[in-house]
Amino acid sequence: MVKYAAFLRGINVGGQKPVPMQKLKEAFDAMGLKSVQTLLASGNIVFEAPPLDTIALEHKIEEKLKETFGHEIGVFIRTMEELEHVSNSKPFKGIDVTPETRLYITFFSKRPKNSLMIPLTSPDKSFKILRISGREVCSVLILSANCRTGDLMKVLEKEFGSKVTTRNWNTIVRVLKTQHT
């Protein structure tokens, strides 16, 4: 069995696309996935399954979620091994983390095409896109009155399209900790 993490796009954000975690867990269980755990209400699920093509698995889960919840929900799958690889690469090494600092990882289903010169720093220095590695983009945001998380998300979606989902790095660390429980 392989341990996977699924990251869902845009659920339970500002009252949009409400998805109760228990019902989400039941949908994953109904697909025959094992040891299903939900983490936080933002759509993070850890589960086990035989080795599978992750793109096909994403489509299968998207279909089941549409059937269950009545609306499209984007799904982005990573093996725990892939997440460990990203973590071990220390994507935020050298970043001075303050209470205003947000570390993000944005997931794609396929390797993104981009025209940006990476690393990229915004003109006002409020955010940086540090790197693109495989099917992820790592970025940093410094919160201020003039720059909020949504501002970075708009830049990422403009460059890479809307078929993405972003998580705070603390969420990824929490997902990785489920391997040891």
Image: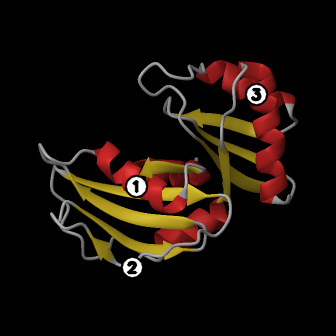
Q: Position of residue 39 (x, y in %)?
A: 54, 36
Asked which secondary structure carries label 1, the reply is helix
**Amino acid at the residue labelled 3:** Lys
Q: Looking at the rendered structure, which numbered label has been put on residue 34?
A: none
Q: Disc 1 designates what residue?
A: 169
* 148 vs 82, nearest the viewer: 148
Q: How crowded is mark 1: few (under 14 residues within 10 Å), some or many (20 or more)?
A: many
Q: How crowded is mark 3: few (under 14 residues within 10 Å), some or many (20 or more)?
A: few
Q: In this view, does 124 lie to the left or right of 129?
A: left
Q: Position of residue 70 (x, y in %)?
A: 73, 20
* Of marks 3 and 1, the one in the foreground: 3
Q: Disc 2 designates what residue?
A: 118
Q: In this view, does 30 lie to the left or right of 84?
A: right
Question: As drawn, which residue projects farthest toward the left?
Answer: 145
Q: Disc 3 designates what residue?
A: 66
* Of marks 1 and 2, the one in the foreground: 2
Q: Which residue is drawn at 55% across and 49% down?
A: 162
Q: Is residue 118 above or below residue 36?
A: below
